[in-house]
Image: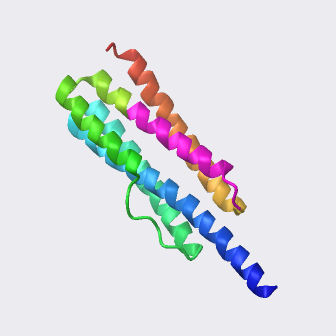
Amino acid sequence: MYDLRKQIFMDENKKLIDTVNHVIRINKDRVEGYKLAARETDDAQLKNIFAKFSADSMKFRDELIAYAIRLGGEPAEDTTQQGKVYRAWMEIKKALTGRDRHAIIASCEFGEDAALEAYDDALKADVVMAADLRELLHQQRLQIREAHDQIKSMRDSVTA
């Protein structure tokens, strides 16, 4: 009986660590995406916005890494495959459109959509999650939603 409980706990803990690691990876994607976007523009205002959003994700990532360690897990060190494909697409798009402000901002919005989806998946995951972790994810998601809305507004204000 004890071994079964221990196994169930270990399985649940692993699922929770996997969930946290997925959000860590998404934040790493977000950091890399905004660094790439900043390199693609000469607009100082955009560079500042991208630097802020990248710094936010570094903070989110660090908070989640600490949580993964607290759970006894090994924090993710890589990015997602989707993020790698997205950044490669941004490079191709840059070659085709140049440093087009609308294209850069639209690419950032795509990345924000992916980040929101990852947070939604984590918050809906079928795992036992402590209230403080759920609150942390919720607060981070709110900030990413604000960033998404700012990026979307900027995209809408720029003609393609």
Colour scheme shown: rainbow
User: Where does the image place residue 148, in percent across and percent down from the top left?
Assistant: 48, 33
Judge whether 99 appears above or below 9 on screen.
Answer: above
Query: Is residue 42 located in the magenta-colored stretch of the structure?
Result: no
In which quarter of the view is residue 128 placed? bottom right
Q: In this view, does 1 lie to the left or right of 107?
A: right
On screen, residue 72 versus residue 156, left or right, reads: right
**Where does the image place residue 146, in percent across and percent down from the top left?**
52, 35
Taking the spot 60% from the left edge, 69% from the top edge, the residue there is: 14
Q: Which corner quadrant holds the N terminus?
A: bottom right
Q: Is residue 1 left or right of residue 7?
A: right
Residue 23 versus residue 110 in the image, above or below: below
| Residue projecting furthest to the right | 1
Residue 85 visible here: yes
Q: Residue at x 41, y 55 (%)?
A: 58
Q: Where is residue 100 in the image (x, y as percent from the top left)?
A: 24, 23
Could you tell me what secondary structure mostly forms the magenta stretch?
A: helix
* Residue 111 sits inside the magenta stretch: yes
Give, as a single range, the part of the protein colored magenta. Answer: 108-127
Q: In this view, does 93 lie above or below 115?
A: above
Residue in the foreground of this view, choosing between 54 and 78: 78
In the image, 141 versus 95, the foreground residue is 95
- Does residue 43 appear in this view? no
Residue at the image position 57 percent from the left and 74 percent from the top: 70
Which residue occupies the foreground of this view, 85 or 107? 85
